Amino acid sequence: MHVKICGLDTPEHARVAVDAGADAVGVVVCERSPRHRTVAEAAAVLAVVPDGVDGVLVVADLPVLEAVDVARTIGADVLQLHGAYTREDLAVAVAAHPRVWRAATPADATADPSATTVGAWGEEVLLLDAPVPGSGRRWDLAALEGRRPEGRWLLAGGLGPDDVADAVRVARPWGVDVSSGVESVRGVKDPERIRAFVANVRRAG
């Protein structure tokens, strides 16, 4: 089970995530997010991530080529596009960066059924998020019945140490992604919650 701890705020918390056994850690460069880091701050967070653990840059409002430049600057292994990016944007990103992940919500499939199909837009991994990304609100996992993606996809949205094991059993994802669920206050990570989250995923999966 692939585990991504996202929205890391400090190098110290990134070390906690790595030491707990996370497979990927994410930093957010998006000014409207409570987890926004400057480019310099994001670079400092990813600088402590060792080989074998993916450092992920998450963007939601940067133009694609600017996002690619930021990913290169901070040494991100993965560029994750999270927001109103189009299929054309994905094509540009995939051509310019070696590894691209894409976030979508079930509602996106209403306009384009391929939106929740892993790899349909050229991405390496699909992150399936709650209807209001970053809000910490859970969504009805029963809605995935018959619509569960195939392949490498991450379940996100409202997960925390107390409910992630049940979510894994119900949704059967390739991996999980957490941000608000391992925070002490909005935007500030909690080391004990990070450790508990990873441990509970490992026990479940």
Image: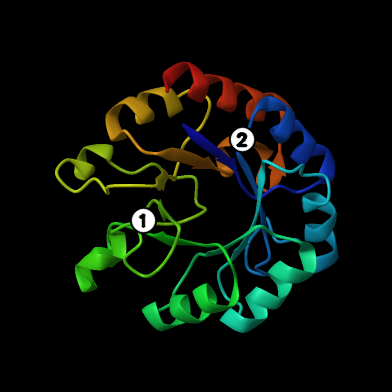
Answer few, some or many: residues within 10 Å of disc 1's Cα (few below 14, many 20 plus, some between 14 and 19).
some
Is residue 38 visible in the rendered image? The answer is no
Where on the picture, by quarter, is residue 156? Answer: top left
Where on the picture, by quarter, is residue 143? Answer: top left
Cα separation, mark 2 vs mark 1, equals: 19 Å
Image disc number at residue 156? none
Q: Which residue corresponds to mark 1?
A: 131
Q: Is residue 63 above or below residue 47?
A: below
Name the spot of residue 48 as percent of width and height, x first.
83, 45
Is residue 94 visible in the rendered image? The answer is yes
Label 2 amino acid? Val
Counting every numbered tag in the picture gives 2
Label 1 amino acid? Pro
Name the spot of residue 15 as percent of width and height, x first.
79, 36
In-image side of 147 versus 40 (left or right): left
Q: Nearer the viewer, residue 160 or 87?
A: 87
Answer few, some or many: residues within 10 Å of disc 2's Cα (few below 14, many 20 plus, some between 14 and 19).
many
Instruction: Give the SS element for disc 1.
Output: loop
Name the residue furthest top. 203
Q: Nearer the viewer, residue 31 or 152?
A: 152
In-image side of 40 versus 109 (left or right): right
Instruction: Give the SS element for disc 2.
Output: helix
The residue that appears at 30% across and 35% down in the rendered structure is: 171
Q: Is residue 31 above or below residue 55?
A: below
In-image side of 69 versus 138 (left or right): right
> If you read the primary sequence from the N terminus, does the residue marked by circle 2 or circle 1 appear first?
1
Name the spot of residue 91 as percent of width and height, x first.
45, 79
Where on the picture, by quarter, is residue 96? Answer: bottom right
Q: Is residue 109 above or below residue 46?
A: below
Image disc number at residue 182? 2
